[in-house]
Image (cartoon, grey):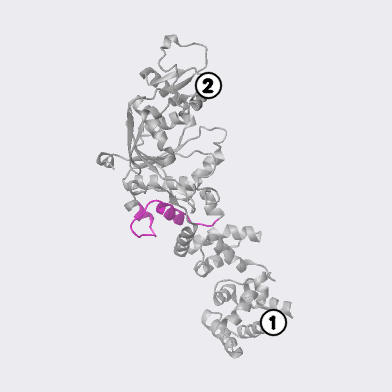
Amino acid sequence: MGASKENDAVVTRFAPSPTGYLHIGGGRTALFNWLFARRLGGQILLGIQDTERARATDSAVEAILDGLRWLDLDWDGEEVYQFSRAARHADVAHELIARGHAYRCYLTQEELAAMRAAAEAEKRPFRIRSPWRDTPEADQPADKPFVVRLKAPTEGSVTISDLVQGDVTVANAELDDMILLRSDGTPTYMLSVVVDDHDMGITHVIRGDDHLNNAFRQLALIRGMGWPEPVYAHVPLIHGADGAKLSKRHGALGVDAYRDEMGYLPEAINNYLLKLGWGHGDDEIISRDQAIEWFDVADVGRGAARFDFKKLENLNGHYIREADDARLAHIAQHRIEAKLGHQLSEAEMLLLAQAMPVLKVRAKTTIEISEGAEFLFESRPISLDEKAQSLLDGEAAVLLDKAYDALKGQTQWELAPLEEGVKAVATEAGLGLGKVAQPLRAALTGRGTSPGIFDVLVLLGREESLARIEDCLARSA
């Protein structure tokens, strides 16, 4: 990183296109911009690239804002909407014409097609070199439609000192004269994004390396206007575990899917995305404060990072165990209510929070927590899954009956005496505790897996526990 830029007021930006959800890769780009700005005491601004009017819906914008808020990635000032600034973008295009760095191009679609076909026939790259490039204004037609093209340099080369990619050089002969204004006068993305970045005072452009080629074309525009050049940092894209470009089958979904459909916590997503291409020694668990203190985009690797759900699950399990019980109960509440078809009462919410210490111990996702808690709120007689039914076959019903008698005689409904009573039943039968605990689990939860059986008894309480066992015994009678 250049020392001069390190000491300047840093301004980064995240500029998503609102054509859907906040992509998980976009979430990482936003995180990197946010951390870089916060570490250097700078600002991060939010630009909404909504020039594609057919796809840039209000709901898509809100989905992106919602995703950023969930990840706790705030931004400074108001969002800048690209489409609303179209007049400003057009003014810059006309100023570039006046400066001699852009021109009106009257090439028709048929002429462009012929130029493209000639390039293909000669097996050379198609680069637009318009015959209108140096035509004096006096010789230009007054009644023909035109586009405005950037007059890109044709000789020499340009080198970008990218914070991630290092020095990257492209010959100017490789660039063509990109369109700035379409024939209807509307600005293109390539013009709009440069103007917005300048007007927002962006000092560092941190984005995916799929935009690296664009940087050279955009620099020609920036230099044509005589504007300060930003520092670029082009971050490698995320790949799937198989090394292929990230797709939906790998997990290229919106962050809302990670929250709602897969049950991840935002702190786990942030921690995982931070580690995709960047690291700090052997540290795996990195808090937000540590991330701000340690992160530098210059330390991001040049190679593509591979998305690994197993690592993400392990991180999520850690953050679930660290999470506040009331918060987890609130997250699980909506899924449980949807499954049960009714809202949880205040007392049931207290029970759910009370159950969190035993529900979250082995959970990797909030979905597992929700599913693990459902038995607490089922109405009697509870249904039994296939595994639970198999646990009640044969002698299991006899053991369940004996366990019921032992539990019914308990005066203290607490962990220690309950465990002592059930152990006595197992000892008398000459069996291990599990042989008695399993039919109890089936009767109390309707499932073959659950939290510890004595935790289950305490959470359900004496009356509900005994009633569920009675229902089960009545079935097998």
- Side (left or right) of 177 relative to 248: left
SS for callout 1? loop
Q: In which quarter of the image is the C terminus?
A: bottom right
Q: How crowded is mark 2: few (under 14 residues within 10 Å), some or many (20 or more)?
A: few
- Side (left or right) of 314 relative to 54: left
- Side (left or right) of 470 relative to 95: right
For residue 212, say whether it is visible: yes
- Residue drawn 57% across and 89% down? 427
Q: Is residue 252 magenta?
A: no
When the figure is inspected, residue 169 is found, relative to residue 119, above or below; the finding is below
Q: Position of residue 323 (x, y in %)?
A: 46, 62
Three-letter residue code for mark 1: Gly
Q: Are marks 2 and 1 in contact (CB under 8 Å)?
A: no
Q: Which residues fall within the magenta stretch?
A: 262-291
Query: Count the marks: how many?
Result: 2
Q: Mark 2 points at which residue?
A: 114
Which residue occupies the foreground of this view, 77 or 208? 208
Q: Where is residue 440 in the image (x, y as percent from the top left)?
A: 62, 78
Which residue occupies the foreground of this view, 406 or 301? 301
Three-letter residue code for mark 2: Ala
Q: Name the residue under label 1.
A: 394
For residue 464, say whether it is visible: no
Q: Quadrant of the N terminus?
A: top left
Cα gap from disc 2 to disc 1, whole angstroms: 83 Å
- Between circles 2 and 1, the one closer to the viewer is 2
SS for callout 2? helix
When the figure is inspected, residue 145 is found, relative to residue 358, above or below; the finding is above
Give the mark nearer the N terminus: 2 vs 1: 2
Q: Does the magenta stretch include residue 284?
A: yes
Residue positioned most to the front? 122
Residue positioned most to the right? 477
